[in-house]
Amino acid sequence: MKFFSTRDHSRIVTASQAIAQGLSDEGGLFVPESFPQVDVKALCGLDYPALAAAVVREYLTDYDPAFLTEATRSTYGAAFGDKAGYLAPVEEDTYALELWHGPTCAFKDYALQLMPKLLVEAKKNLSRTEKTLILVATSGDTGKAALDGYHDIPGVEIAVFYPTGGTSEIQRLQMATQEGANVAVYAVRGNFDDAQTGVKKVFGDKVIAAKLAERNIRLSSANSINWGRLVPQIVYYFAAYAQLLKAGSVAFGNEVDFCVPTGNFGDILAGYYAKRMGLPVGKLVCASNENNVLTDFLTTGTYTAKREFFKTTSPSMDILVSSNLERLLYHVTGSDAEVAGLMKSLAETGSYTVRPETLSAIQESFSCGWSSEEEVAGEIRARYEQDGYLCDTHTAVAFHVAAQKKREGVPMVVLSTASPFKFPRSVLEALGRTAPENDFEAMQQLEAATAHTAPASLAALRQKPERFSTVIEPAQIAEVALGYQE
Ligand SMILES: *Cc1c(COP(=O)(O)O)cnc(C)c1O
């Protein structure tokens, strides 16, 4: 399987190159040249690690299959509490795909526990010996998941940038207390898009790349623009379908809809790949919070990032530029020139409009909706009181939209992307309690109120010393990158 850039077909790379490099040199994203067709029924019989190996192998064709088998087996077992891809029934034929049983309690662990192994192997495949400097812009969950995945990985340094005040206190502490000799964490003044734009600028800066190359350092990305982030996420769509099949909740070949709380469009795009690989996915429902730029785009065909930015109780979805949408635009138009033009328009004017044919092709697979802050809180309470199901703010955004888009007779799987204990104040308030200022006290009160237990890794944060407290301007991200030595 070859990969090429969404903005320039002639830039062709292997999977190892795509993963080691992250972004194509001219700013495009790497996409596979085709969608491998799989035997869905056979895949549905596998356990999670074997399923992961089978799916990932279809794309990472220059990797040793034995390595992939071993890597997925060592990743998706005990570290996920043996609940990788666990599907929980919620009400009638609506389900929650609980993706937060990993070490940092958010779905990003699926990709970021595996990706460090894929990167080390990619360098081996390419006979490369340089140091890899990973820069990550995060609205909260990616940062911690990347730090946890990459800490003390040989030949790798990682620096994480999160927006000041843009994360929950728990999320901030998860990052500020990260252990490891090769990690660094910075708060960046501004919102997530400021941090992401700052990091993207460094990736696009040839002078910085040249200076680092002199020191045998190469930049790479752990953001969901890296193919290595996307490919492990395809797996759990198959896992969800397999469980429905096993429980007799769907007949083989019948469609299942998925509703995905969306920010950067990575998680939901993985569902699109699953569909194109042959999984009977009906609609992929894109759920947004008040930053509903994707709802507008999927409804009108015009993407406008120039709009008011809202800080919500689902901070990991507070995003105005959804980077992975570029991959979908490529797959739907099949034209690198067209995608390059749209992205140029986005960079220069803050918006673009796709052709009507493009919009209708997208709408064949995707529907959309959004939830206000009030609706999110109401949804958390309703799911808890009516179904006994406790969910976090991001998942609640999706539950609310899923209820509107539910089709009679078609099972609906809501991707549950974070543990409710990661956002204990918001969840407690949604349940009608007055939340204490302190996140840890809120966590304890949430435990008492619901008889659920907070994940041990979150409760333990209270005792851990904070290692990182530096605050920088977005423009200083370049200086940070240039501060690394061989
Ligand atoms: C990252 C994240 C999302 C959004 O996922 P994208 O792939 O960026 O669309 C949703 N919920 C949680 C909890 C997240 O951490």
Image (cartoon, helix red, strand yellow):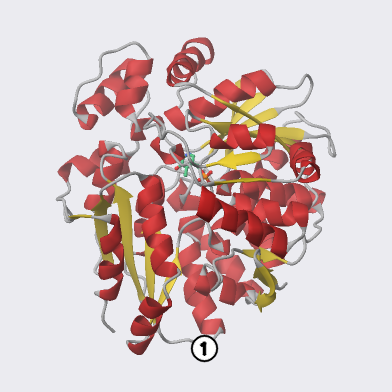
Pinpoint residue 244: horizontal percent, then vertical percent: 71, 34
**Quadrant position of residue 444:** top left
Which residue occupies 79% across, 50% down?
40
Task: State which quarter of the image contains the C terminus.
Answer: bottom left
The amino acid at mark 1 is Ser
- Would residue 274 be seen by someone viewing this image from the given angle? yes
Say whether mark 1 is within 8 Å of ligand 1.
no
Q: Relative to residue 404, is residue 5 depicted above or below?
A: below
Q: Residues within 10 Å of mark 1 (few under 14, many from 20)?
A: few
On the picture, is 223 further left or further right than 67? left
Q: Nearer the viewer, residue 429 or 238?
A: 429
**Quadrant position of residue 51:** bottom right
Q: Relative to residue 375, is residue 326 depicted above or below?
A: below
Q: Relative to residue 412, is residue 132 depicted above or below?
A: below
Task: State which quarter of the image contains the N terminus.
Answer: bottom right
On the picture, is 104 further left or further right than 233? left
Q: Relative to residue 338, is residue 95 depicted above or below?
A: above
Pinpoint residue 484: horizontal percent, then vertical percent: 27, 76
Pinpoint residue 96: horizontal percent, then vertical percent: 58, 30
Which residue occupies 45% across, 23% down?
390
Which residue occupies 67% across, 70% down?
8
On the picture, is 191 further left or further right than 417? left
- Would residue 139 be seen by someone viewing this image from the given angle? no
Pinpoint residue 478: horizontal percent, then vertical percent: 31, 68
Task: From the image, tell me which residue sits under label 1.
Answer: 127
- Secondary element at image label 1: loop
